Amino acid sequence: MKLYYKPGACSLSPHIVLREAGLDFSIEKVDLATKKTETGDDFLTVNPKGQIPTLLLSDGSILTEGVAIVQYLADQKPDRQLMPEQGTLARYHALEWLNYIATELHKGFSPLFNPKTPDEFKALTREALSKKFAYVDESLKGHAFLLGTRFSVADAYLFTVMGWAKALKFDFAALTELNAYLERVAARPAVDAAMKAEGLK
């Protein structure tokens, strides 16, 4: 498999999952401004959406959208328990977190990355995100990870998104549960390896 990525972007989430699952894969960087890959290919011929993450499967087919990709990867290696079993309530709680991170956190950052967003709206966006970070902090009380004691694909996604919060200098020093959680996730060998591979540390 090949993962098309941009360093530190949402593609970091499936990159972490690939390493956590112990799957055989390669990575190829994409310049989203020019839509060219690091080997000079036209990325739009790979994924007409022009977005990362994009996963090229061994049969030549393409899978896009981070939430779909991480579930697919987890199901390739069920013994790694990166997603709870099909049909269990825990599985639906994992989907609940993936959707919350995608819609409330990930998309919530969009105005902050757009230079045309008015400062007043950026301030409102930061305030709204801060409230959501506080909710996550509260949810982590008594839990090592989002689903309890085991690391899951939802943790890979949350860790990725919180990296943007750090880059944008959000102050969440008071969110002690969230800070301790991010340190736990960062210390995982697969996470460390993905960060190094993308030049993030």
Image (cartoon, helix red, strand yellow):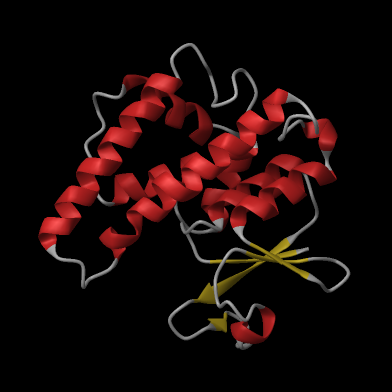
Residue for point 59% across, 46% down: 193
Q: Is residue 107 above or below residue 128?
A: below
Query: Would you say 162 lies left or right of 67 here?
Result: left
On the image, the x and y values in percent for residue 1 come to: 78, 63
Query: Which picture quadrant has residue 56?
Result: bottom right
Query: Which picture quadrant has residue 21?
Result: top right
Query: Would you say 67 lies left or right of 163 here?
Result: right
On the image, the x and y values in percent for residue 38 come to: 58, 79
Q: Is residue 107 above or below residue 35?
A: above
On the image, the x and y values in percent for residue 184 come to: 50, 27
Q: Is residue 149 above or below residue 157?
A: above
69 and 171: which is toward the camera = 69
Residue for point 46% across, 57% down: 8
Q: Is residue 155 visible?
A: no
Q: Is residue 48 above or below residue 197?
A: below
Tell which residue pokes out farthest to the top in this image.
142
Query: Would you say 104 lies left or right of 25 here?
Result: left
Tell which residue pokes out farthest to the left in this image.
120
Q: Is residue 127 visible?
A: yes
Query: Which picture quadrant has residue 188?
Result: top right
On the image, the x and y values in percent for residue 120 come to: 11, 57
Q: How many marks?
A: 0
